[in-house]
Each structure stands twice: as structure tokens, then as C-alpha cells.
Amino acid sequence: MFLNPISLVFKSMTALASITLAFCMLLLFDAKLLSSWRSHWKQSLYSYDVEVGKLVDLAENALCEAA
């Protein structure tokens, strides 16, 4: 069976376009997901820093009172 070169090129270009589109959609979804996770972790780390800061202040006050 003889394959038509034009048909073969068209099929390969279609496959390449489909793969590229799927890859771009995956990157877009991943970027949105990462952005969501990044904002969540920033908020968590900020509240953790605030709590640690409060504990450090309490420890410093206790040391000053003990001295």
C-alpha cells in the first residue's frame, strides 16, 4: 500500500498541533494551580511568621523580667 506524502504530512502536522495544544493547556492549568497553591502557602507562611514573632516577643519579655 502506497502512502500519499501529502496525506502523511497533513496527519503528522495535525498530530503535532494536537500535542502542542494539549501541552499548552496543561501548562495553563498548571500555572493556575500553582498560582493558587502559591497564594495559599504565602498566607500560611505569613501567619506562621506572625505566630513565631509573638512567641519570640513573649520569650524576650520573660527573659527581661527574669533578669
Image (spheres, helix red, strand yellow):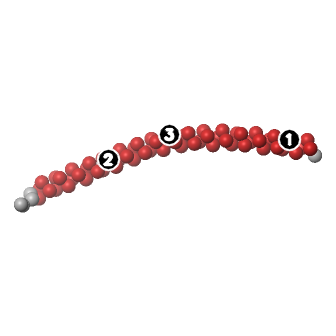
Three-letter code for the amino acid on which mark 2 is drawn: Ala
Asked if marks 1 and 2 touch (Cβ < 8 Å), the reply is no
Closer to the chain start, of discs 3 and 1, is: 3
Classify 11 as above or below 65: below
| Disc 3 crowd, CA 10 A, few/some/many (<14, 14-19, 20+) | few
Mark 2 element type: helix
Three-letter code for the amino acid on which mark 3 is drawn: Ser
Left or right for 31, reference 52: left
Closer to the chain start, of discs 3 and 2, is: 2
Please provide percent x and percent y for residue 64. 89, 43
Q: Quadrant of residue 66?
A: top right
Give the residue furthest to the front: 1
Mark 1 element type: helix
Q: Residue at x 80, y 41 (%)?
A: 57
The numbered dot on residue 61 is 1
Please provide percent x and percent y for residue 14. 21, 50
Three-letter code for the amino acid on which mark 1 is drawn: Asn
The numbered dot on residue 22 is 2
Asked if marks 3 and 1 touch (Cβ < 8 Å), the reply is no
User: Residue tagged by mark 3?
Assistant: 36
Left or right for 57, reference 42: right
Q: Residue at x 48, y 44 (%)?
A: 34
Q: Residue at x 61, y 40 (%)?
A: 44
| Disc 2 crowd, CA 10 A, few/some/many (<14, 14-19, 20+) | few
